[in-house]
Structures are given as structure tokens and as C-alpha cells.
Image (cartoon, rainbow, N blue to C red):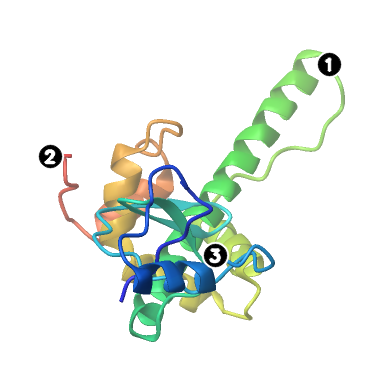
Amino acid sequence: MPYVILNIFPERLQPVDQKTVLTCHVVADPHVHSGYIQIEGATLYSIGWPLSVWVGGRSGWFKLVTPAAQFQGIFAEIGEAITLYYEILAVFEDFRDNVEEYVKAKSKKKRVKELTPLDLDTVLLKYAVAVGNGMFRAEAEAQCHKWAAFLINHLFKEEEYNWKGTFFYKWLIEKHPVRPDTTH
């Protein structure tokens, strides 16, 4: 039986029978700030960073903290793909910031250390370090191959960072010549 949380939208959720009222009193204990709920008819989801998954249903949005056992595998897969994307994005954004600082310092005629160009080995190393699970370069590259279709599709549609001109995007396209989904 799905549970009803009264303290989320109390004006929109009204118990319809005594059994539901008893269920609501058990679940909506004011001393408990979380509980296990079943969200029926969930048609929307949102993934954020740091990694969080939100599920939208008729009653509102709920943060998925611990998925049911049958969904733990897909939850872990989502986490792996999202972590890969955002950690690689962080590497490129940091590099872009360093380039901006370098250009600014050079324009003021300050002595600055030459920038080391960003390459695939550096990106994969920084990703592996950020994940922190002891993976080697080959494993980091394997993650990119595993999630290539997701990455290519996401990078192709990204509006906040221009991936299309990067060596990383070109490398992915070269290794995985799939056509990004341009219908969405």
C-alpha cells in the first residue's frame, strides 16, 4: 500500500478512510524526519550534483536516499555515470579558470609558470583521484568507454560548457562513432 505523507502538502492530501488515517499517523510522526515511502506514478526525475536523485510524483518531489533493493543496481549505475560526467567537467572548468588567470597575469606582465596543456592522461588521472577508489588509468578510460553513449549525448546537448571543441569530445566521437540524439 502506498503511504501518504501529511506534512509535505497537508492541504492537498486528505485521508479517505480509517485505515489510511492510521497509516498516515504512523508515517507522519513529527519526531521522525525521514521514513520509507513508496512513490506511485512517478513520471519525473532529476539528477543533481553532488550526486542526488529526486523523484517526482503526484504528491511532490522526494529525494531518493536509499532505493529499494530492486533499484539499487540502477541507482549505482546512475551514480557512476553522473560522477564521471561531473568530475570530468570539473577538470575542464578548473583548466579553463587556470587559463583565464594565466592570461590575466601575462597581460599584467607578471612572471608566471607556463601552463601544461590538458591531455587525456591528465583528465583520466584527475578523474581517478577525485573518485578516490584506487582505480588506474585504464579503469578510468574503461569508464569513459562504458558510458560513451551517455557522455556523447550529454556533451552534445550541453549549453553551459562548449564540449564540441575539446579534445575529450573529439576522442569520444572518434572511439565511439555514434550519432548524438538530437531529437530532444
At which x and y percent is residue 14?
37, 53
Disc 3 crowd, CA 10 A, few/some/many (<14, 14-19, 20+): some
Ranked by sequence position, the earlier of labels 2 and 1 is 1
> Image quadrant for the C terminus?
top left
| Contact? badges 2 and 1 (CB < 8 Å) | no
Q: CA distance from mark 2 to mark 1?
A: 48 Å
Out of 77 and 93, give the one closest to the viewer: 77
Out of 41 and 91, give the one closest to the viewer: 41
At which x and y percent is residue 48?
49, 51
At which x and y percent is residue 150?
30, 57
Q: Is residue 130 above or below residue 22?
A: above
Q: Which residue in the protein does label 2 denote?
A: 183
Question: Which residue is at 34% across, 55% downward?
Answer: 151
Q: Which residue in the protein does label 3 denote?
A: 28
- Say what secondary structure mark 3 lies in: loop
Residue 46: image tag: none
At which x and y percent is residue 147?
33, 65
